Image (spheres, rainbow, N blue to C red):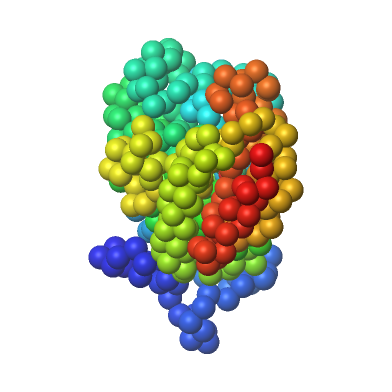
């Protein structure tokens, strides 16, 4: 399978026809336990928390897509993230991207800091020297998210991986925003990739799921394998099935997301009511160069500031029709939100202000609807502003 291209692997990897029936699609193995021939003699499965054939197919598929050696499926992105942090000894220090997904920040700051005596330094990783300066004697791990959320900064993965290797730190990339199609951090030297598969990988806004893929089968990977079963926050067979189905169309969906998002970013950039557009695909973006180098496309997320204050922003949101006002991202349907009031409300106001996540920042998850319909919707809402 490894000699095939991405689109082929997304459809076939880990998915042999069912040996009992020839079914071309991996069945939903809705079973908690598996009958054994004699004690300890079985067909590779004993109990569905430790292993389930539908989940195994998904784990094999994502491992091959990310070009790693092992995949692990969890009940949510945060469940997957939690297990990665659980591999660290008590009192570890980690260096994390400052412009981090709100739920990740909450997990680190409100849970792990207390329970595991975790120390965290948040760094603007577009400046790699700041990462090096943050390293301490107890630093164990570097946690990167790129593109960042919601400011869509791009972090140079190759440079961060080199720093991690030199200082013997575990490197983790949250690859949710780019998706496996646009960016493969393990091939750039990262140890682990983590996903909220709730977003682009599933792509249809109908499940919550998390994935981890490891580059090598080392002690950390073995610990993740152990913890997945020992903690038990695994993905169900039904959700594994839906995620496998979602992955089959990842290639065409991402191409469509990228094309729509770029067209919308260019359109907004030229609009008189828009103050600034944040999108790495814009030639004027300070991150255009590094994005072009490490990504296959610029993604489906676009953030922008309107002229005027919070009132104008609220008015715009009231007028928009086709974009649904909702948290989350990565589905086929377009969404709109205000990070400061919604997805990033759990981040303290002064930190949000420092980062530039103001009440007037709007984030779009551009779907794959007809481009003209999306442009028309934005235009009619913008036309109602002063
Ligand atoms: C949504 C999200 C998560 C959390 O994933 P869940 O599936 O909601 O638990 C983590 N990181 C990023 C970048 C996300 O967008």
Quadrant that contains the C terminus: top right
* Residue nearest the observer in this picture, 382 or 190: 382
Return the residue nearer the eye: 137 or 31.
137
Q: Ligand 1 appears in which quadrant?
A: top right
* Vertical comparison of 154 with 370: above or below: above
* Residue 180 shows in the view: no
Which of the 4 image quarters holds residue 163? Answer: top left
In which quadrant will I find the N terminus? Answer: bottom left
Residue 165 shown left or right of residue 323 in the figure: left
In the image, residue 167 sits, relative to residue 146, either above or below, namely: above
- Point out residue 36 in the picture as x, y percentages from the top left corner: 60, 70
Residue at 33 percent of width and 52 percent of height? 296
Given the current orientation, which residue lies at the most extreme front position? 386
Residue at the spot 44% in from the left edge and 28% down from the top edge: 142
Q: Position of residue 97 (x, y in %)?
A: 48, 28
Where 132 falls versus 44 (above or below)?
A: above
Whether residue 239 sits left or right of residue 141 in the image: it is: right
Quarter holding residue 256: bottom left
Rendered residue at 56%/25% (across/down) = 356
Q: Quadrant of residue 380?
A: bottom right
User: Foreground: 156 or 143?
Assistant: 156
The x, y position of residue 358, in whole percent, is: 63, 28
């Amino acid at each position: 399978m490894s000699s095939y291209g991405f689109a082929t692997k997304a459809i076939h990897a880990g998915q042999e026809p069912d040996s009992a029936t020839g079914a071309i699609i991996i069945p939903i193995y809705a079973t908690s336990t598996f009958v054994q021939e004699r004690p300890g003699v079985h067909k590779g499965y004993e109990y569905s928390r430790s292993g389930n054939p539908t989940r195994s197919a998904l784990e094999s598929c994502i491992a091959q897509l990310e070009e790693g050696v092992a995949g692990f499926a969890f009940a949510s992105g945060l469940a997957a993230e939690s297990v990665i942090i659980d591999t660290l000894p008590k009192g570890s220090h980690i260096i994390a991207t400052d412009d981090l997904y709100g739920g990740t920040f909450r997990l680190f700051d409100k849970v792990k800091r207390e329970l595991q005596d975790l120390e965290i330094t948040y760094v603007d990783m577009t400046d790699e020297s700041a990462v090096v300066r943050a390293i301490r004697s107890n630093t164990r791990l570097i946690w990167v998210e790129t593109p960042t959320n919601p400011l869509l900064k791009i972090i140079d993965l190759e440079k961060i991986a080199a720093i991690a290797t030199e200082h013997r730190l575990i490197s983790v990339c949250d690859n949710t925003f780019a998706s496996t199609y646009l960016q493969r951090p393990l091939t750039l030297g990262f140890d682990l990739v983590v996903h909220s598969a709730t977003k682009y990988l599933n792509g249809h806004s109908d499940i919550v799921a998390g994935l981890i893929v490891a580059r090598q089968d080392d002690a950390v990977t073995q610990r993740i394998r152990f913890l997945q079963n020992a903690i038990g926050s695994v993905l169900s067979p039904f959700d594994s099935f839906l995620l496998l189905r979602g992955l089959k169309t990842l290639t065409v969906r991402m191409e469509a997301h990228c094309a729509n998002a770029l067209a919308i970013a260019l359109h907004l950039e030229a609009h008189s009511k828009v103050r600034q557009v944040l999108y790495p695909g814009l030639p004027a973006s300070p991150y255009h160069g590094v994005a072009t180098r490490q990504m296959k496309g610029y993604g489906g997320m676009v953030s922008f500031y309107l002229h005027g204050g919070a009132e104008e922003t609220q008015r715009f949101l009231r007028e928009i029709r086709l974009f649904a006002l909702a948290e989350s991202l990565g589905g086929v349907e377009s969404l709109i939100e205000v990070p400061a009031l919604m997805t990033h409300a759990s981040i303290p106001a002064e930190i949000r202000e420092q980062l530039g996540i103001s009440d007037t920042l709007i984030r779009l998850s551009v779907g794959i609807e007809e481009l003209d319909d999306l442009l028309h919707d934005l235009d009619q809402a913008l036309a109602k502003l002063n």
